[in-house]
Structures are given as C-alpha cells and as structure tokens.
Amino acid sequence: MERTPSRPVAILLSSHPGPAFAVTTVTIVLGIGVGLEPWRVALLGLAMLLGQFSVGLSNDWLDAQRDAAVGRSDKPIARGWVAASSIRTIAFVTAALAIVLTAPLGALVTLAHTVFIASAWSYNAGLKKTAFSVLPYIVSFGSLPLLATLALPQPAPAAWWGLGAGALLGVSAHFANVLPDLVDDAATGVRGLPHRLGSRASGLVIAVALAASALLVAFGAGQPPLPAQWIGLALTLALAVLAGGLAAVRAPTRLLFQLIIAAALVIVAMLALSGTRLIA
C-alpha cells in the first residue's frame, strides 16, 4: 500500500520545487555576478524562492479540476493529499511574503518582482490556454537579469542583450515544459502556442531559442567572449541540438525540460561571468 505523504510534504510537492529551486539558483548566480552584497543576494534569493513557490502552488490550485479529470498521479490535490483551498491560501501568502521580502532591496526591484510574479500567475490564470501562452515566460524570464541589477545599492537597468537572453530562455522553458502534457491538455481544452504548433515545430523553437540566447550572452556585449564562455556556448549549442532532436523524433518527456534547465544554468553561468557588463 502506498504511503500518503504528510501535509507539509504534499504542500511542498504542490509548489513545483524543482523549477522553483532552479529559478532561485539562477537569480542567486546573477546577483553574485553583478556584485550584490551577500545579504542582498540572500534576501533576493529567499524572495524569489517564495515567489516561485507561490507560482507553483497557484498552478496546482487553479488546475485542480483538470488534474483530477486526467488522473494526474503526481499532483497532491488530485490525489487527495491536500485540499485545494489550503493550497490557494498558501499561494497568496507566499506571493505576499515574496514581495515584502524584496522591499528592503528598493522600490524598483520590488516593482519588478511584483510584475514577475503577476506575469507568472497570469499564465496559470488563463493565458496558458491561448496563443499568447509564451508571453508570461518572456516577461518573467526576461526580467531575471533586471532583478539582479535593480537590487544593487544604486539600481541600474540590465543590458539589452541580458534581457533578450533571459526572454529567449523563457521561450525554450515554456515549450519544453508543455510538450509532455500535450495529450492531457488537449483533453481538458488547453491550447497554448506549443499545442498549436505541434511537437516537431516546438522542438525547433526550443533549439533556436536556446542557441540564440547563448549567442546573445557570448557576443551581445560587443567584446570577445571569455574562454569559459566559449565552452559554455559550445555546450549550450550541443544541448540545444539534442533537445530539439528529442522533441522531433520521440514523444516528449520530462527529460526534455531537464535538458533545458541544464542549458539554462550554463547560459546563466555565462551571464554571471559577464560581471558588470550585464549592467547597462
């Protein structure tokens, strides 16, 4: 007999901890790269983690009926491990805490983080069902470098190529995250942009977006890439080809999303190596 997890564990599973910790890691690395003081890095990272928890929780709360209809065994609400109303309340609380924790870093970064969270929630609230499903990912991922530079003691905008690289990462993350659920989504009336394009075209989008993101980081600043950035560029291009190929020749799985996360971390490392060049 399968053991039912405790309520705290069920809540954690509903928060989509994998993506939450991945995006938080990206934020911390970017903060270190632009030279934030340790306390600023820690506070920004904690605020991002809570914000990402709120996004994951809102997803499970808003999709509870859909998940139950298609028998999602990986969803705590669908399994009856935790009530949807509890997840809803915790989602709002963690979103509020994330914004409050960002406040000591300054008004501009607090505003940017609020937009980040609102954008992600808008996807869960309905944009995922439209041809504009990719927009929240473009906005949220594109603003990650901006969160780091606005958290500086003297806030500054992020370089255009850093914003572009983040937005392109968001495109690839959206397509890779959706592809494994195409059949279940179709059964419940969800038709975002990847659904409309199909798996093969979506695989091409993933590969192109990843490659373009890495190229922007390597050459966008108008200076020769560092040796480590050349290595990162080569690795990312290889991962882009692999991810695009997998999406084109086989049914998408979570492995595809994991490859995108790996490529994203490489690109973020390249961004961090850019240091103060990321500041416009």
Image (tube, rainbow, N blue to C red):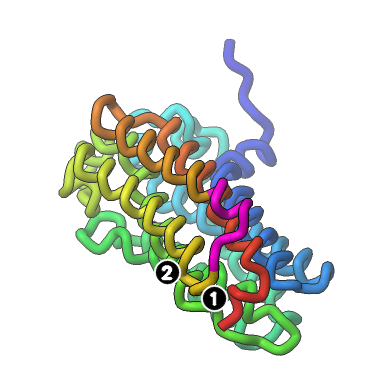
Q: Nearer the viewer, residue 170 or 165?
A: 165
The residue identified by callout 1 is 114
Q: Quadrant of the N terminus?
A: top right
Which segment is the magenta one? 224-232
* Residue 174, position as x, y percentages in the image: 37, 51
Number of numbered labels in the structure image: 2
Residue under numbered circle 2? 164
Q: Which residue type does callout 2 highlight?
A: Gly
Q: Is residue 53 visible?
A: no
Provide the secondary structure element on which disc 2 rests. Answer: helix
Q: Nearer the viewer, residue 50 or 252?
A: 252
Name the spot of residue 158 as percent of width and height, x first. Answer: 55, 78
Tell me which corner region of the image, top left, top right, bottom left or bottom right, holds residue 107: bottom right
* 20 over 220 or under it: above or below: above
**Percent position of residue 146, x then y:** 56, 75
Question: In this image, 30 relative to 215: left or right?
Answer: right
Residue 178, compared with residue 107, is above or below; it is: above
